[in-house]
Amino acid sequence: MLTPLGRGTLVGSVLLYAAGFALGYPEPVVLATGGLIALAAALAWTAPRPKLEVRREVTPGKVPRGDAAVAVLHVRNLGGRRTGLRARDRIGGADHTVDVPRLPRHGTRVLSYPLPTGTRGDIPIGPLMLVRADPLGLTRRVREYGETRTLLVRPRTAALPVPPSGRAHHLEGPTSDSAPSGTVTFHTLREYVVGDDLRLIHWRSSARTGTLMVRRLIDASLPTTTVVLDTRDLTELAVDAAASVAVAAATAGFPVRVLTGDGPVAETKGDPELVLDRLALVGPGATGVTEALRRAGGGGSLVLVTADPAEASAVSAVRRRFDRVICVHLGPSAPAAPGVTVLPVTDLAMLPLVWGTR
């Protein structure tokens, strides 16, 4: 395609031709001819398409924020002549320049470069874009090679013990409908959804209602850890703190719920990877945690992560629904909250220290 300079050269050449013929002067025609010849040569320069095979690896595919990750490119020359090139690799919303040394016929080069991991989230890597321009800058062609890979930058976590529920749960049933799904004891019936185990279908109830009903089994002996994250004025410290608490419970095999003011983020039993994957994508929100606390049900431990002193105090209103309530307050001082253990935290390294004093 023509660059702005190339389009200007084309327009100028056309005007010079018109002026030369109209006025009868040969000089403008000569200049116009030179411009068109330069454009033709530039198009011929950028027309050849290098025959390349590009294979990409991102290792590791998931990484805590700030840890090292590397992109590895395998570039193979499928053409019949040696070629060297300068390309751009797309990393999120930025470009990274990649210099590929001259490749012999059917030769392969392996190139690697570090990836930025300072920003949490899902970062697309690729495709590799080969930009070929003529020496005069009149034309430029951009061609894409290889496929896109994704780097997931997850929250950082600190090692914590599981927050205690403060109370033993009854082995014969849950304290509420929010008890985690499991395999220990029967709780209630619900409608069948695709993917349910057919062995759990309650045929007598299904025949009576005309709808397939399945038994819901629960593990009532395991207390649930509910983590509520305040996403207003969201900081990485807030996400890291919430991830640390949730991962501690999930790693120990306990049920975990993670909520924000905008809705549920993750619910799992013993799967810390799921928690980290979901929290990697959490963004700022405009809603407080009042509704999230209402949806949290009850039982087990409640951990609120917030920088708002008002929210830290308001969590006292739900303390009777939970066996233990902890507020991780992102600030140097801890606001008073009756019946709530408030832990002031200013950086992630401080969380295990105050967590041990709860």
Image: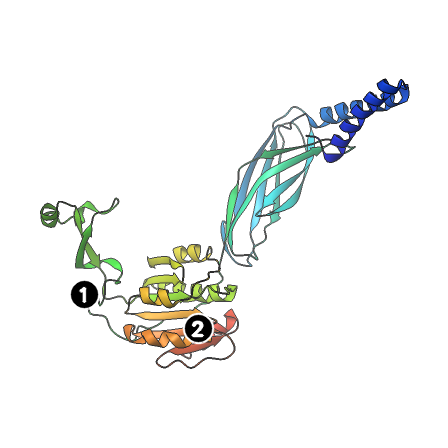
Density class for disc 2 (Cα within 10 Å; few <14, some 14-19, many ≥20) is: many
Lateral position of residue 358 relative to residue 36, left or right: left
Tell me the quadrant of the picture where the N terminus can be found: top right
**Residue at image point 63% right, 25% down:** 79
Q: Nearer the viewer, residue 195 or 313?
A: 313
Who is closer to the viewer here, 148 or 81?
148
Q: Secondary structure at mark 2?
A: strand
Identify the image quadrant of residue 22.
Answer: top right
Image quarter hosting the C terminus: bottom left
- Read off the residue under disc 2: 328
The residue labelled by disc 1 is 173
Q: Would residue 162 be visible to someone looking at this image? A: no
Q: Amino acid at mark 2?
A: Val
Residue at the image point whose x is 30% and y is 70% from the top: 300
Residue 35, disc: none
Indicate the position of residue 166 as horizontal and vertical percent values: 30, 76
Which secondary structure, mark 1? Answer: loop
Left or right of 245, for residue 194: left
Q: Position of residue 83 (x, y in %)?
A: 69, 30
Query: Nearer the N terminus, badge 2 or badge 1?
Result: 1
Alpha carbons under labels 2 and 1: distance apart: 30 Å
Query: Which residue is located at x 32 percent, y 67 percent?
Result: 294
The part of the image, by quadrant, that contains residue 52 is top right
Report the amino acid beneath label 1: Gly
